[in-house]
Image (cartoon, grey):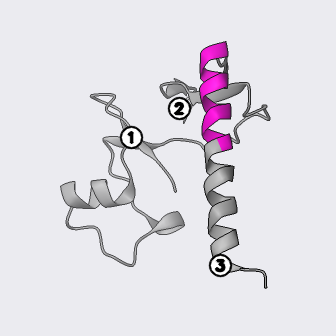
């Protein structure tokens, strides 16, 4: 889903639906490549997130920035603390326990 920035206020993110609320003159059939971006908004160029280990890190987008008229953002890979890793592991173990119980109830053996 494409996101937009208000280039005057730097408010972000906006999506087509948000912009339609502010500009009801935009027709419903105008979407995606045919969406008429109003002049106070700019499309943020989409970039793929980096590859990272979700067990030990998480990613975050930066605030969009303008380079030669193109609005982009960067990704930051942030290391989880030992406490966060332990909490995630505990949550995964609890999830696996519940999933095993549900599977046992749905597939009783004779």
Q: Is residue 80 above or below residue 93?
A: above
How far separated are the C-alphas under marks 2 and 1?
Answer: 18 Å
In this rendering, does residue 74 appear at all? Answer: no
Q: Are marks 1 and 3 in contact (CB under 8 Å)?
A: no
The residue sitting at 78% across, 31% down in the picture is 52
Tag count in the figure?
3
Determine the residue located farthest toward the front in the rendered image. Answer: 110
- Residue 88 magenta: yes
Number of the label disc, if any, that sits on residue 106: 3
Q: Main secondary structure of the magenta part?
A: helix
Q: Position of residue 107 (x, y in %)?
A: 72, 79
Q: Is residue 86 above or below residue 99?
A: above
Determine the residue located farthest toward the bottom in the rendered image. Answer: 110
The residue sitting at 65% across, 78% down in the picture is 106
Where is mark 2, residue-wise? Answer: 69
Bounds of the magenta segment = 82-93
């Amino acid at each position: 889903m494409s996101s937009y920035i208000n280039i005057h206020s730097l408010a972000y993110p906006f999506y087509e639906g948000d912009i339609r609320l502010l500009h009801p003159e935009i027709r419903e059939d105008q979407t995606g490549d045919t969406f008429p971006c109003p002049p106070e908004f700019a499309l943020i160029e989409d970039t793929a997130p980096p590859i990272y280990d979700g067990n030990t890190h998480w990613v975050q987008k930066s605030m969009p920035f303008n380079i030669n008229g193109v609005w982009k953002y960067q990704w930051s890979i942030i290391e989880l603390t030992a406490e966060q890793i332990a909490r995630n592991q505990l949550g995964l173990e609890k999830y696996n326990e519940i999933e095993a119980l549900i599977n046992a109830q749905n597939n009783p053996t004779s």
